[in-house]
Amino acid sequence: RTRPPSLQKNLRPPPAHPRTTARTASVRYGRDATARRDGYGCKAASARTRPPAAAKEMADPWSWYTEIPVVSRLYLSASFLTTAACALDLVSPFSLYYDHSLIWNKGQLWRLVTNFFFFGLFSLDFLFHMYFLVRYCRLLEEGEFRGRTLDFVVMLAFGAGCMLAMAPLLSVHFLGSSLAFMMVYVWGRRNDAVRMSFLGLFPFTAPYLPWVLLAFSVLLGNPATTDLVGIAVGHAYYYLEYVYPRVAEIRGFRVTRVLAVPESVR
């Protein structure tokens, strides 16, 4: 029997609740509907919703390693291999530390370099320094020194030379941590607007990062002298590279950049 149009309109069922609709869709269409709902409703998407490139990068450490710039990759490799050799008793740390008397009197010139590659045996402190070494060395080489590899090498050479000159006066024998703190300091000063937080406890801006790391390193039982050397040398480099050229240009000095790489070398 045919009902009047007004009666058919009144007999229509009420619209389904949104939750009921989503639940029905997930049952009807399987995991795809659930994945779409989770992608919008959860704080982070599940593993099956990640892009294939991101999943491949997380599953392939070799790709991550090869994407590190050349100078940062060489420094990371030398530091890790040196620590591994000491952990396996293939090399003694006593043959690596900086001692100016052994260098000049007995000709052990390798100590000028090897003391920058040893960060202690495998421990929490070693992982702490490796993480910040790789992160901020890479950020500098890919950001501030992008396309200027020679300038980046000059920065490392300047820092290493200053630290080697200061080490006998302060009785510091391993300078790898100092060089890492120098890079953290330079990166922080060049990115002064970046906001950060330490372990999610308190926020701060990037220039305060070396001081926060210094406090954390002291809490781990490390002496503050080694890291303070890196901060001091980093400040010296920052002044000569970024502050002095402006002062020299204003006052009309002939030499405006002390650490500039000659054009003939480039």
Image (cartoon, rainbow, N blue to C red):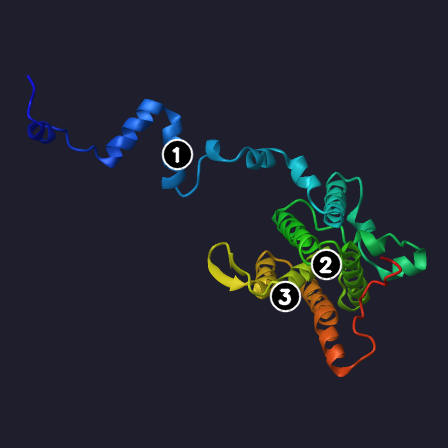
Q: Quadrant of the N terminus?
A: top left
Residue 179 — which label? Answer: 2
The residue to which callout 3 is attached is 189
Mark 2 vs mark 3: give the one in front. Answer: 3
What is the three-letter code of the residue carrying label 2?
Answer: Leu
- What residue sits 66% from the left and 37% below the top? 63
Is 252 rendered above or below residue 79? below
Mark 2 vs mark 1: give the one in front. Answer: 1
Q: Secondary structure at mark 2?
A: helix
Q: Quadrant of the C terminus?
A: bottom right
Q: Secondary structure at mark 3?
A: helix
* Residue 145: % across, % down: 72, 57
Q: CA distance from mark 1 to mark 3?
A: 42 Å
Dot 2 or dot 3, earlier in sequence: 2
Q: CA distance from mark 2 to mark 1?
A: 47 Å
* 158 relative position to 203: left or right: right
* Residue 189: % across, % down: 63, 66
The residue to which callout 1 is attached is 36
Q: CA distance from mark 2 to mark 3?
A: 16 Å
Q: Secondary structure at mark 1?
A: helix
* Residue 162: % across, % down: 79, 66
Dot 1 or dot 3, earlier in sequence: 1
* Residue 41: % across, % down: 36, 40
Q: Nearer the viewer, residue 143 or 168?
A: 143
